[in-house]
Amino acid sequence: MVIHVDTDVCEEPGYDVSRRDAQGQTLSVQALIAAVRDKLIAAMGGGFADYESKVVFAVAVDSIECWLLPLLYDERAKQKKIAGCQAAANEKLRRLNREPLSSGESKFVPRYERESSEFRKQSTLMKHRDKNPSLFVFIAALDALVGA
């Protein structure tokens, strides 16, 4: 089972995961993913341990759109963005004369399906996994599950 969550609203009430450590320093991508994972496991209660070996957390820092940037941009800085990814993806798609992923608050699911379709090819996914830090963590978790 894959549990996907974005971190763009992680500090809002109900989600309650801070982007900062006890000293006020911004968490690394890996530390933020771990904090989100820990929060979700705690919310699931003690029964989670029975299923832990079958669960992979897909924690997108800051949003799932960040994982699409390696498919859209050649520039390393754009590929590894972890904030403002929806705007960056939409900007690039417009420059390519393609429809954006969203408009205002509305997201166009078929556009996401189209723009992420290259990730259905394992070779493409493996080629791009190292280009975005939270995508890398997710693929590593999948690799660990398959290797288990």
Image (cartoon, grey):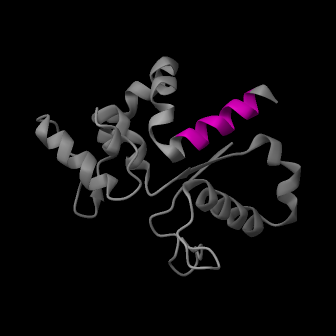
**Main SS class of the magenta portion in the image:** helix
Does residue 142 belong to the magenta stretch?
A: yes
Residue 127 on image: x %, y %: 47, 23
Q: Quadrant of residue 98?
A: top left
Residue 64 on image: x %, y %: 43, 49
Res. 122 in view: yes
**Picture quarter with the C terminus:** top right
Q: Judge from the rendering whether residue 47 lies leftward or rightward of residue 127; answer left or right.
A: right
Residue 21 on image: x %, y %: 62, 74
Magenta stretch bounds:
136-146
Q: Judge from the rendering whether residue 54 lies leftward or rightward of residue 114; answer left or right.
A: right
The residue located at (12%, 39%) in the rendering is: 95
Q: How many marks?
A: 0
Q: Quadrant of residue 30?
A: bottom right
| Nearer to the camera, 131 or 121 | 131
The residue located at (56%, 79%) in the rendering is: 24
| Nearer to the camera, 82 or 148 | 82
Q: Is residue 74 above or below residue 54?
A: above
**Picture quarter with the N terminus:** top right
